[in-house]
Amino acid sequence: MVGPTDDLDLIGRRTAQRACVVRALIDHGGFVGARALHGILESQGARVGLNTVYRTLAALVGAGRADVVRDRGGERLFRHRPFPEHQHYLLCRVCGLSTPVDSEAVESWAERVAEASGFAEVEHTVELTGLCPRCRSHPTY
Amino acid sequence: MVGPTDDLDLIGRRTAQRACVVRALIDHGGFVGARALHGILESQGARVGLNTVYRTLAALVGAGRADVVRDRGGERLFRHRPFPEHQHYLLCRVCGLSTPVDSEAVESWAERVAEASGFAEVEHTVELTGLCPRCRSHPTY
DNA sequence: CTAGTAGTGACAATCATTTCCATCTACGGT
DNA sequence: ACCGTAGATGGAAATGATTGTCACTACTAG
């Protein structure tokens, strides 16, 4: 299989700005807020409007190429998702380090609850937060 | 057992405004946004500031007498919690109907993940949303 | 009853996100 | 390669939830 389905192909036209945003998101590795990502792009000299950052991230989420979580303040944090599977993360509250977790158990639990409830189109959000080993031994506060 | 530990006792001084907010929250039964609750109070003729609604709800949450979830728009929705146990809900996206769900499985899963990860102070948020049977058969959109 | 502190509320401030809209550009057709 | 146009951009303004400010009020201990 060739390297075909580029993220950019999934979200509309190829533009320099979108390429920048996607690249920055991938490079960042973990979860980032839209504003923070915009800041990173600015510091790299990329001239991309905040608006475009928001739109691109929304498009990625819509295409299933990014995950979203809410931090405590209600801000949305985005993370690139190379594979199309539904995924959950354990996120460090201090440094933002995120590690995917095995979600089998919740998935099947959610399905079971959905069936038993009589509800339709049940979606679930699972967010785990904590202090990663590094931040744990190296308290910055 | 007497009706002892009143919600109001847990959050500071007893004031008419707080009593109104707590009463309205309990009467509402399901999840409500702060602004919506404020609207309900106004329509009842209760003169309570929006600010006070926010503060009272925050105090209830702090005392463990209310649960919070975020709706899709990021708004916080509150629900009175008569018992001190940690609880998860299945929430209707259309009418807001909420039903507590058996959360044993997620709880133990979350614990297991926490232990395996090396993270400390792991907290979890689980939100299930769907269409309740009523809204399902009675599409309003 | 009185003092003192916690609570209140109108208003302004904040903060993330969205909308507007005038301008620009990628790209399929020629 | 050139064009037309739908789609994309970005700056400014709007929105909407939530929080801060601060003068004023009213519980409650003493």
Image: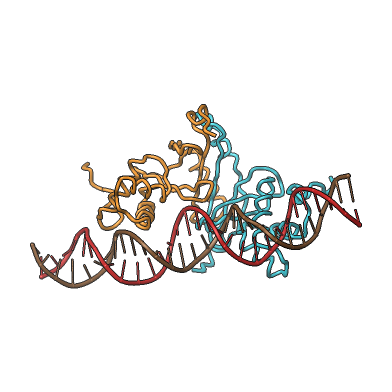
Chain colours: A orange, B cyan, C red, D brown
Residue ID at (37%, 39%):
A29
Q: Position of residue A56 (x, y in %)?
A: 34, 54
Position of B12 with respect to B115 (left or right) is right
In the rendering, at what x and y percent does residue B54 appear? 64, 56
Residue B105 lies in quadrant: top right
Query: Looking at the rendering, which quadrant does residue B18 occupy?
Result: bottom right
* Residue A138 or residue C13, whichever sits in front: C13
Q: What percent of the width, then of the height, locates residue B12? A: 75, 49
| Rendered position, A73 above or below C17 | above
Q: Nearer the viewer, residue A112 or D16?
A: D16
Q: Is residue B36 left or right of residue A140?
A: right
Question: Farthest residue in the top direction?
Answer: A137
Q: Is residue B85 above or below residue B113?
A: below
On screen, residue B123 versus residue B44, left or right, reads: left
User: What residue is drawn where x is 73% and y is 49%?
Assistant: B11
Camera-side residue: D8 or B102? Answer: D8
For the N terminus of chain B, the quadrant is top right
Q: Nearer the viewer, residue B50 or B93?
A: B50
